[in-house]
Image: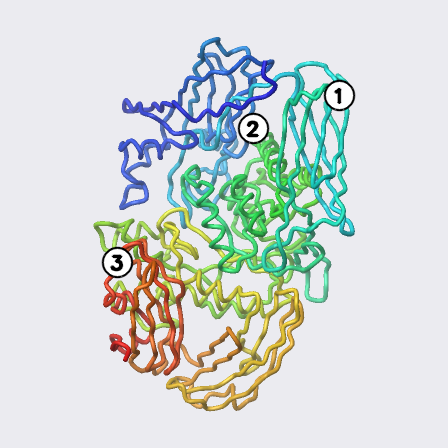
Amino acid sequence: MTASSRIALSEGWILSGPRGIRLAATVPGCVHTDLLSAGVIPDPYLLDNEERVSWIGHEQWSYEADIQAPHADRVDLVCEGLDTVATISVNGEPVAQTANMHRAYRFPVTELMRHGGSRLRVTFDSAIRYAEEQRDRLGDRPRSYPQPYNFVRKMACNFGWDWGPSLVTAGIWRPAWLHCWSIARLAQVRPAVTVDRGTGIVELHLMIERTRELPLVVTAEVDGVRAVARLAGSESTANLRLAVPHVARWWPHGIGDPARYALTVTLSTVDGEPLDRWRRAIGFRTVRVDTTPDADGTPFVLLINDRPVFVRGANWIPDDAFPSRVDASRYARRLSQAVAANVNLLRVWGGGTYESRQFYQTADQLGLLVQQDFAFACAAYPEEEPFRGEVEAEARDNVLRLAPHPSLVLWTGNNENHWGHRDWGWVDELDGKSWGRGYYNQLLPGIVAELDPTRPYWPGSPYSGSEERHPNDPAHGTTHIWDVWNSRDYSHYRSYRPRFVAEFGYQGPPAYATLRRALPDGSVAPDTPGMARRQKAPDGQDKIARGLAEHLPPPGDADDWHYLAQVNQARAIRVGVEHFRSLKPLCMGTIVWQLNDCWPVIAWSAVDGDGRLKPMWHALREAYADRLITFQPHDAGVALVTVNDTAQAWRERITVTRRRLDGVVCAAATIDVVTHVSSAIWSRLPENVVTAGDPASELLLAEAPGRRAWWFFAEDRDIAFPPAAFDADVVPTSDGYAVTLAARSILRDLVVQPDRLNPDATVDRSLVTLLPGEKVTFQVRSPAPLDPAALLTRPVLRCVNDRVAGDVPRRPAG
């Protein structure tokens, strides 16, 4: 007999399907990745292969493996993720049927196991066909995209989105294992973690599953504090309380350290024989959202340890259309990119998944706050069975699974469904049918209150706090701003005075190397068929062109378009973020759409589908700095705004100059500013400084140690930029090159794009503006040698005024 053992089911799998397919499979994984590894299909991310592999989602697939377990009272088959419509059998005997990608399953299979080995089979029916059948049975309901993703509990964006491919997957997408146990196991461990006047409190709620009625002992320990409960032979629940004095609190990065403590729960017999153990790293902190009405409406203020936190956020989508490919190292890389961009919160968007334990462990460690949406997005969802039962089961499963993680600070009921019901014509189309209101307003908040009462719940994103108000009212709660991308210039962000912006974004193309990999034998010009497949948003290319025309000179070729479209995306996000931050404390959060991509595509991301940083990422890093200097329109002129998100007051002497493009100072002022903790200060500037003699040839520059802010009085398309000129020096380093440029003219939004020379080459900065006489060094990293001259050649080296005034004159330094 063994007390408890876990046998991973990750080896020896065979996938079989239509067309005589039978091949080795990987678990965790999915059909697409198995077929790709075997060379049966081309890479769905390249060329037009997305369309060529669309048949996969319409077929039935089976996974089979031999399994064996030691003798125990109980053998359970545990599947942490089945995608999606599955029938499970052991030795030909039925075990269960499932239809939910978003939950884990545990099935007792003791009586089905054979001595010497057994055969496990998991057959997946088409999720598309299942969804169509449910739609026909219950009556159709509105959604934002054609396929009926709202009729199956599966990752919605799998069916295609305005940034994602339609690649409808199937497979064992999270780990599967056999749990062999005897006497008893810890069926549920639910810690509620808070802080009370410096003492960390852990309220543990335990459920025990038994095979024998024996007395048991449960022990919990954290930081040397121990609690013990004794259970009689028939008891199946226990509650323990641990009080840890003088705890170090868990703080988000930028405010403090994300201190964590190991919490261990052990189940044993009264004789001390261990039966089961549960161990997690927890963090002591409090979290609440202040929505107390005020004179301006309804605020939405996140407080961590009673400290108001301005949310500098980004929306998170699945990092791969095949999520099983996202491993711990990729989570670490992507979340570290978020932190390096000064992002302090990721919102896990409701059209994807409930993220993995690896994602949350990484966020815990980095001090990165997480808002987790329940899995509903841009559609009306049926509340009839079998869906209501599935929604309740998945919600309970995921709330319990994620409760130990201190990074998780907010549950959200849905993405844009209240808004859709109000404004998108759903009411007439529904004709009285259910649409999800009961989930968002009753079922889900009830589950959070029962199982995770230490965290707040908000019914939707956006949501104004009351069904009596418009759900996307900027003056109340959270708002999404999409009229800018869809129909308005990005300067329109400045017309908003929102309380909390949970989504806003602007498109730009991915890195050149990412496009070239996706279209290896095609043009990357914006109007080609290949590029059309990289643009999933309706009228997306026209919207990019409209935005360019408002601000920048017209592109002369594909290289111009790529550079200028990336610049315009970065500027749009900078304008929005800096304006919203300047409104602090009226506005207390921005969550940019979006941090990442799931494949190579033209989209709103800061990090593209191949993991490369776009210029937007660099703009976001500056706009989200702990301490920010920015110019903002004020009355008929321009004001200087300082924003302080740190825990200390910020005293700074700032020099503001009005200059000609050749750098000559026309007027100057020095301002001493004290910006208190968690505040923004607006400072008026002298009229002679902020009044341009010639808007097309003058600018404002604010300077403080390590910080700069620019204001151009005219759009770049109308500015009399001189031809770009500089001296250059390229010096080899241990891992690449130091590219130093000394400006002889103004250089507007200078970039180096080394991935055009080697797809693995990177650069440390982007969008640098220099005045004549100023110097900058770009650190280029490359695993292979690059041509130094090419680093100084268009299109690798670009600035706005090389498009305005012609090719960049250059000469070696000295």
* Residues at discs 3 and 2 in contact (Cβ within 8 Å): no
Q: Residues within 10 Å of mark 1 (few under 14, many from 20)?
A: some
Mark number, residue 359: none
Of all residues shown, which one is farthest toward the left? 521
Coordinates of residue 696 in the picture (x, y in percent) = 39, 84
* Label whose residue precedes the other's in the sequence (3 or 1): 1
Coordinates of residue 59 in the picture (x, y in percent) = 36, 28
* Label whose residue precedes the other's in the sequence (1 or 2): 1
Distance, label 3 to label 2, CA atoms, is: 59 Å
Quadrant where the image shows the C terminus:
bottom left
Give the number of callouts: 3
Q: What amino acid does circle 3 point to?
A: Pro
Circle 2 sits on which residue? Answer: 386
Q: What amino acid does circle 2 point to?
A: Pro
Q: Residue at x 55, y 48 (%)?
A: 363
Circle 1 sits on which residue? Answer: 235
Mark number, residue 785: 3
In the image, is 724 to the left or to the right of 767?
left
Q: What amino acid does circle 1 point to?
A: Glu
